[in-house]
C-alpha cells in the first residue's frame, strides 16, 4: 500500500523529526484516535524497523497517570546523568489527557522536559457531541511551557509541517525559547494533534527529515542586568557568619560556595551538594535544639541555592535572614522569598570570590556548626530503615525517595559524603506529592546505567501501586523498592494535627489501610520479601536484584510527637557561640 493516508504520513514525519531533535524515549498509552502515532512508534521500535525510521525506545502502559510519571522518571534519569532531553507521552483523547495532569504539574515545578502528544478529533467533530471529545486545548493551563494545536492533516498538504512543529516543540521543552525569562527553563510542552479517519497504518515510506532551525529573538545572558532583584556588585558581602542552604537541584555549586567562604552548608539529600568539609549532616536536629535556635539569630547572611522544602526550621532560618541571597530557586526561580536582597537564576561566578582586602575567614563559626552531633539511631524505626538504605548506596547508585516521611528520615541520617562519592538521590520535590512515586522509580530504573533503589512509605506505595504494572511484552527494569510500612500516614502524627482526638487523627489523617503487600506484589509479578529488623534489611539490600523486588520493612507505628515536624532526636552542640568581630551580634554589620 502506498503512503496516501494523511494521518499516517503526518505521524511518521513527526516521529522522524522529533528523533532528529533528540527525542528517543516514548511512553504510549493505547487508544484509537492516537492510532497513527501508535503505528509509527511500533514500526520505529521494531527490531526490523523500516528504512529511514529512527531507532526509539518505546514503553507501553495502560494507565495514563502512571505513564506520565514513568516518562517523568525517564527524563529525570537523563538529567541526573547530565544529558537532559525530552521524553514524549502519547495518549488518545478524552479523560486519557486529564490523567496526565499530576505528572505535568510536577514536571512544571521541577523543570523536567516532557512532550505531551495528545490525539484529538478533527474540528468538525468538536462541539457536536462526538464520543470521547472534550476541550483539550489549554487543558494544562499554565503548567506547560508552550501549548499548540495541530490541525488534522489533509491529502493536499505536503511534507514539512510536522517537522517544523517538532523543532518548535523540542525547543520549548528544553527551555531554549522561553518567552518570559532570559534563562533556559526546561519543562513540559503540550501539542494537541487532530487526526481524521482513516487512522490505520498505510505501509508508507518514512521521510528524510532535516533538523529545522529555530529563529528567535536574541536572549540576554545572565549577568548584572538579569538579576531579578538587587543592583550593584554581584560579590557577596564580607560577612563571617554566613550559612549556605542547598535545596533540591542545587548541585555542586552550593558546596563550592560554602567552602569558598568557610560557611556551614545545610544540604538536603536531593540537593546534590551534601558533600565536602563544610556540610553539616546533623543540621536538622541542631536547628531544633535550643542552641541551634540561638544560632539562627546570629546568622548575618543566608545564601540559598536550589529549592529547600523539607523542614520548617530551615524555612525559619530563611524567613528571618538579615541578608538573603537566592540562586536557582527551582524551575521557576523567580518564586523566591519576597524579602530576598538578590535573586538570580544561577550562581554567578562572583559569588565564589571574596572581595579584595577582605579579612581571612574565621573558622570559629564553622567549627561551632561542625560540633553538632550526627543523630544516632536506635531500635527498629523509620530512621533505621533510612540509615540502612543510605549505607547500601555506592557512588554509582541512584535512589528515588518518597516525598513524605522517608525523605525526612533520610535527611536526618544521611552523612556528608566526600566529593564524588555521593550516590544520586532523586525525589519529586517540585510539588512534593506522593503520587506517581513507583512509576517515577520505574522510569528512572529503565533509563539509568547504575543500580536503582526506591525508598518510600506504605501510603506512597499503595497510592501508586498501579505503577508496578508492566506488560509481558515490555522491558522490565531491575528495581528494588524498599517500603517502610508503619500502617498508614504516620507523618501526620508528627504535625500539629496530633493534638486532635485520636480517633479523628486516625480516620482522616493517618488512614490505616490494612493491606497485605505480599499478595499485592505477587499480582504484579514482583518478588516480595518482608523484614522485621535492621540485620535482615541490610542483608536484603546487599543481595543483587533482578526484575522488580519489594522489600517490606514492617514497623510499629511511631508515637505522636506534635512538637516536631518529623521524628528526630534532640541534639545540641557544646560550647558557646564564638565571637567573630562585628558580625557577632544580631543585626550586626552587613
Image (tube, rainbow, N blue to C red):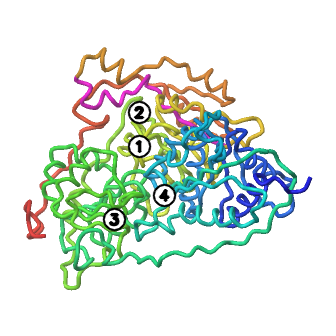
Task: Assign a secondary structure to mark 3.
Answer: strand
Q: Nearer the viewer, residue 245 or 281?
A: 245
Q: Please state the horizontal and vertical placement of residue 405, each as a whole percent of the image.
A: 39, 36
Q: Residues within 10 Å of mark 3 (few under 14, many from 20)?
A: many
**Which label's residue is closer to the chain start, 1 or 4?**
4
Mark 4: secondary structure? loop
| Circle 2 SS class | helix
Residue holding disc 2: 382
The answer to which quarter of the image holds residue 442 is top right
On the image, the x and y values in percent for residue 588 come to 8, 66
Spatial distance from mark 2 to mark 1, Cα to Cα? 19 Å
Residue 427 appears in the picture as rendered: no
Q: Residue at x 67, y 40 (%)?
A: 29
Q: Quadrant of the C terminus?
A: bottom left
The region drawn magenta spans: 478-499
Q: Earlier in the sequence, mark 1 or mark 3?
A: 3
In the image: residue 457, left or right of residue 73:
left
Return the residue at label 1. Answer: 432
Marks 2, 1: nearer the viewer: 1
Q: CA distance from mark 1 to mark 4?
A: 20 Å
Sequence-first tag of 2 and 1 = 2
Q: Is residue 495 magenta?
A: yes
Disc 2 vs disc 1: Cβ atoms closer than 8 Å?
no
Task: Say if mark 1 contacts mark 3, CB within 8 Å.
Answer: no
Residue 51 in view of the camera: yes
- Residue 465 placement (x, y as % from top left): 57, 30
Amino acid at each position: 500500500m502506498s503512503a496516501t493516508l494523511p494521518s499516517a504520513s503526518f505521524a511518521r514525519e513527526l516521529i522522524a523529526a522529533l528523533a532528529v531533535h533528540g527525542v528517543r524515549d516514548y511512553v504510549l498509552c493505547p487508544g484509537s484516535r492516537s492510532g497513527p502515532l501508535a503505528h509509527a512508534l511500533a514500526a520505529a521500535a521494531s527490531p526490523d524497523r523500516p528504512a529511514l525510521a529512527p531507532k526509539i525506545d518505546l514503553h507501553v502502559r495502560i494507565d495514563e497517570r502512571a505513564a506520565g510519571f514513568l516518562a517523568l522518571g525517564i527524563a529525570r534519569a537523563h538529567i541526573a546523568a547530565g544529558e537532559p532531553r525530552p521524553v514524549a507521552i502519547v495518549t488518545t483523547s478524552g479523560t486519557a489527557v486529564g490523567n496526565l495532569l499530576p505528572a505535568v504539574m510536577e514536571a512544571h515545578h521541577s523543570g523536567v522536559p516532557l512532550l505531551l502528544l495528545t490525539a484529538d478529533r478533527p474540528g468538525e467533530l468538536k462541539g457536536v457531541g462526538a464520543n470521547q471529545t472534550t476541550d483539550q486545548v489549554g487543558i494544562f493551563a499554565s503548567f506547560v511551557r508552550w501549548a499548540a494545536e495541530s490541525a488534522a492533516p489533509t491529502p493536499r498538504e505536503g511534507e514539512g509541517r510536522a517537522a517544523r512543529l517538532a523543532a518548535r516543540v523540542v525547543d520549548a521543552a528544553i527551555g531554549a525559547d522561553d518567552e518570559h525569562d532570559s534563562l533556559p527553563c526546561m519543562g513540559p510542552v503540550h501539542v494537541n494533534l487532530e487526526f481524521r479517519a482513516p487512522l490505520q497504518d498505510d505501509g508508507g515510506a518514512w521521510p528524510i527529515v532535516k533538523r529545522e532551525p529555530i529563529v528567535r529573538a536574541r536572549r540576554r545572558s545572565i549577568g548584572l542586568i538579569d538579576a531579578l532583584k538587587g543592583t550593584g556588585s554581584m560579590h557577596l558581602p564580607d560577612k563571617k557568619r554566613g550559612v549556605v542552604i542547598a535545596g533540591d537541584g542545587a548541585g555542586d555549586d552550593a558546596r563550592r560556595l560554602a567552602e569558598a567562604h568557610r560557611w556551614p552548608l545545610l544540604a538536603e539529600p536531593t540537593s546534590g551538594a551534601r558533600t565536602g568539609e563544610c556540610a553539616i549532616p546533623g543540621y536538622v536536629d541542631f536547628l531544633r535544639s535550643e542552641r541551634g535556635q540561638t544560632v539562627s539569630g546570629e546568622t548575618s547572611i543566608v545564601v540559598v541555592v536550589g529549592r529547600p522544602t523539607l523542614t520548617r526550621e530551615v524555612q525559619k532560618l530563611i524567613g528571618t535572614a538579615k541578608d538573603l541571597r537566592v540562586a536557582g530557586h527551582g524551575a521557576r526561580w523567580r518564586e523566591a522569598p519576597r524579602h530576598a536582597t538578590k535573586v538570580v537564576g544561577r550562581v554567578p561566578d562572583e559569588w565564589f570570590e571574596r572581595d579584595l582586602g577582605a579579612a581571612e575567614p574565621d573558622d570559629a563559626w564553622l567549627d561551632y556548626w561542625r560540633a553538632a552531633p550526627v543523630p544516632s539511631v536506635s531500635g527498629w524505626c523509620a530512621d533505621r530503615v533510612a540509615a540502612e538504605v543510605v549505607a547500601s548506596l555506592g557512588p554509582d547508585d541512584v535512589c528515588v525517595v518518597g516525598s513524605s516521611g522517608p525523605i525526612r528520615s533520610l535527611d536526618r541520617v544521611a552523612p556528608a559524603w566526600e566529593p564524588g562519592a555521593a550516590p544520586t538521590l532523586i525525589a519529586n520535590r517540585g510539588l512534593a506529592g506522593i503520587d506517581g512515586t513507583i512509576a517515577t522509580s520505574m522510569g528512572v530504573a529503565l533509563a539509568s546505567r547504575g543500580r536503582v533503589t526506591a525508598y518510600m512509605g506504605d501510603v506512597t506505595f499503595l497510592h501508586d501501586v498501579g505503577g508496578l504494572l508492566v506488560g509481558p511484552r515490555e522491558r522490565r527494569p531491575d528495581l528494588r523498592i524498599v517500603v517502610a510500612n508503619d500502617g498508614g500516614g504516620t507523618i501526620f502524627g508528627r504535625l500539629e494535627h496530633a493534638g486532635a482526638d485520636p480517633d479523628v487523627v486516625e480516620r482522616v489523617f493517618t488512614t490505616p489501610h490494612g493491606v497485605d503487600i505480599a499478595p499485592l506484589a505477587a499480582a504484579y509479578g514482583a518478588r516480595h520479601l518482608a523484614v522485621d529488623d535492621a540485620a535482615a534489611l541490610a542483608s536484603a539490600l546487599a543481595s543483587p536484584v533482578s526484575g522488580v523486588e519489594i522489600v517490606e520493612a514492617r514497623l510499629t507505628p511511631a508515637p505522636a510527637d506534635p512538637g516536631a515536624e518529623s521524628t528526630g532526636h534532640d541534639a545540641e552542640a557544646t560550647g558557646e557561640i564564638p565571637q567573630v568581630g562585628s558580625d557577632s551580634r544580631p543585626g550586626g554589620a552587613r
